[in-house]
Image: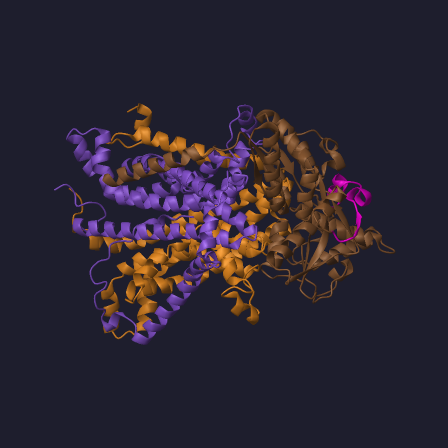
Amino acid sequence: MDTALILQPTKPQRGGIGGPSTPATTEPLAVRGVLITIALVFLGVFLGAPLAVVFAEAFAKGTAAYWESLREPDALAAIKLTLLTAALAVPANLVFGVAASWAIAKFDFVGKSVLITLIDLPFAVSPVISGLIYVLLFGLQGWLGPWLAAHDIKIIFAVPGIVLATIFVTFPFVARELIPLMQAQGNEEEEAALSLGASGWQTFRRVTLPNIKWGLLYGVILCNARAMGEFGAVSVVSGHIRGLTNTMPLHVEVLYNEYNFVAAFAVASLLAVLALVTLAVKSAVEWRYRRELKRGGATPGPGGPA
Amino acid sequence: MSPLLGRIKTPSVIPGFGLTLGFTLLYLSLVVLIPLSALILKTTELTWEQFWATVTDPRTLAAYKLSFGASLAGALINLVFGSLAAWVLVRYRFIGRRVLDAMVDLPFALPTAVAGIALTTLYTENGWLGRYLEPLGIRVAFAPLGVVVALTFIGLPFVVRTLQPVIEDLDRELEEAAASLGARRITTLRRVILPELWPAMLTGFTLALARALGEYGSVVFISGNIVGETEIPPLLIIMKLEEYDVGSATAIAVVMLLASFLLLLMINLLQWWSARRHVAARITLRVSPSAGGV
Amino acid sequence: MSGTRIWASLLGFGLISILPSIGAGADITLLNVSYDPTRELYREINEAFAKRWQAKTGKTVEIRQSHGGAGKQARAVIDGLEADVVTLAQAYDIDEIAARAGLLPADWQKRLPYNSSPYTSTIVFLVRKGNPKGIKNWDDLVKPGVKVISPNPKTSGGARYNYLAAWGYALQQPGGDEAKAREFVTKLFKNAPILPTGARDATNTFVQRGIGDVLLAWENEALLATKELGKDKFELIVPSVSILAEPPVAVVDKVVDKRGTREVATAYLQFLYSDEAQQIVARNHYRPRVEAAAKAAGVEFPKVKLFTVDEVFGGWNKAHKAHFASGATFDRIYRPGR
């Protein structure tokens, strides 16, 4: 769904937070204790426990069994395919995101809000449908299927289909991140650079890019996490060929269905580690971003050319 | 600049409009619009009666009902506990707060299939949590409640993350003023704080709801796929395909698509509404430092 | 700026390190698209065949596997999954591939011995240790309070056998007729609270998640489950009568002609009938066509009276139309919100 909201780096906290609260603006100690406990239990049950169970099950038969299941050729193939998919889908959506946000944030034109809604659309589409549409389009019984088969081009049940479905589900991430950021920054700096004789490309590279780099990185990280973890859409177009078209999440499902719980959770634990790394990098980016904001002033964007 | 472009767009000195917009439209069409139109067109192969019979079949209706009901329940749980968590994370200082704060996005970063098998393992009869719930007669895994749990998990970040910045922006002077006027804390909460937070809470709730409606990966593992009881629409789509019934599969897909489109529209309206409510407050705060190079 | 450069180089490095490894491997690859419970069987068969083929032709062959519910797998082949051979649960699914995509001729079943099914199986019951509900035969499954686990006949080939086996049993009882059979099967599925999509999912539900009193399963699946997941936890119950399941195999003509793999694909399927493969079949708890193979492999199969789909239902096509097609008997007896 519309992830744009959580994707926004949290706004810089103004002074006062972290400072002592006056009794008038906070709750009694006991109430605070109770509230913190409830929050901890809620987050613990819904976030901590699932994460813990992944690692517990993965190491249920010891570290040797764990490494063994990760060294298995099919597991390695799944890991490689997942990396390849992300390596193709993320840059594609990165280029798109930059182009779309440039067009949308820097210019005013007819139908802009319709365009933004259309970019959001993949968030709203159920993953199964995201896969289905490519089967309808490229499947042997679909529109282009017979032509593709005649020319021996494989799209679904092969790597291109998996990449396409992944691009679809991660489509809006970078664009949604950059559009509000570039809108907030306005056009003045670019206009100044252009009037000083910089070319369009130079202006983008030297002026715009440094301004949006954290938002860009942020979008890329989340886009990447989703690309590596997508299950529903990829499941529909994969064909589930062991060692060839199984991505990591699909391989987890295969192993899970083979009673091979240790191996299933071992591969799942890699994905969980990936999720944790994503969260860590994301927090780091937020922190850097906030620090730059503190140096540059309270509005999003750099301090402006001195 | 061609005259046509001149008519649809406000003039600007910044270059690259044609290139970037052209690329955007091309990419959007190739990846999103053309494939989606394949779905719509496929549905038109059905007669209206067939379409109607498929989407109002009792089993399909049961799936819609479960999907909507469980999404609603999950979003409500997140509304209550997510708001509380957001409050605690912003307002209180305690050990591990930063880690917890970072962890809130976990459902977003953790692949849904992993979440599915992890939650299933937790809540089965002999799982860590299931073993305590089962004797109480509470069945979670392979029951509608399991779907609620999965959808609560995936919707968790939305309420927390929409609320956090709003709570940070809350003007403490208002609370102090209320207190100095003799309002008790609970009254301040009800009369001063909640009205401020309400639009963001609603937005977060709707986002969680919308995300839950489309979810597939985590639900298929924990639901047990009991016919007419724990089936969700995406699963029915897959089943129809396996029964060689592509028409019905696309019919259900189109209904889902419409529903999510409506929700998307609602979210945009909500965001517009809550932004408008907040703009006035923010302008007064932000107008002074480095407002731009005017 | 340096950040973007690092990203770009990371991505580039990633691509370079990944690309060469894809597509490497054997001289020839075959894709065998199969149904759920054959994973272990074909793992062994593929290894044995690769050895044989290399000895005979000097070429290496790698057989890739895709497993899933039979309906899903057939659907994928129809939509263009390039399977050189399909090894599915029942003739109906391959018939659908022939009818809907025209990838192989309609008379494919005549091309290999025994109706193109090199091994058979049957439907048995798996119960929990000590058989607490005292389940001995089909009649016991419809008793109130017995929770039966079976996959969904709409999506699982195995489940269709479950359904037809129960129907056939009821028909063969004294005074049995269509109405009685229908009533019997209706009661049976009233006792089935969960209908997983595939046979493997059903086994997982029963064995791993501890749900249900009795699992209706392929004999091979039940034997495998007891072997892999604890002999001391489950008991195999063989009913007085059951159905003969004949999982068929076929070369997908259009695919092998396009890929130039007809020779090896045909040899692969013929290999299934060889003594060596038949012993592997027996070791994996499928009933071999060559009876001596079971003995040679040291495997004994329980004796059970078996009837075939052709005998009782007049073939798969008829059975499917009458029972499993949209709006047919199964849809009418299994309604949500009972």
Q: Quadrant of the N terminus of chain C?
A: top left
Asked whether A255 or B123 is in front, the reply is A255
Q: Which chain is purple?
A: A
C312 inside magenta stretch: yes
Report the side of B101 relative to C332 (left or right).
left
Give residue C66's position: percent from left, percent from top: 57, 40
Question: Residue at the location (70% across, 41% down)?
Answer: C278
| Magenta-colored span | C301-323
Residue farthest toward the left in the current orientation of the protein: A306
User: In the picture, residue B104 is in which quadrant?
Assistant: bottom left
Give residue C3's position: percent from left, percent from top: 25, 41
C267 inside magenta stretch: no
Q: Colour of chain C?
A: brown
Report the side of C34 relative to A102 (left or right).
right
Q: Which chain is orange?
A: B
Question: Residue at the location (50% across, 45% down)?
Answer: A250
Report the side of B286 relative to C9 (left or right).
left
Give residue B176's position: percent from left, percent from top: 23, 69
Question: Residue at the location (62% across, 29% down)?
Answer: C56
Report the side of C281 relative to A121 (left or right).
right
Q: Inspect this view and state whether residue C264 appears.
A: yes
Q: Height in image: C337 above or below A71?
A: below
Q: Height in image: B58 above or below B198?
A: above
Give residue C124's position: percent from left, percent from top: 72, 54
Q: Quadrant of the C terminus of chain C?
A: bottom right
Q: Inspect this view and state whether residue B261 appears.
A: no
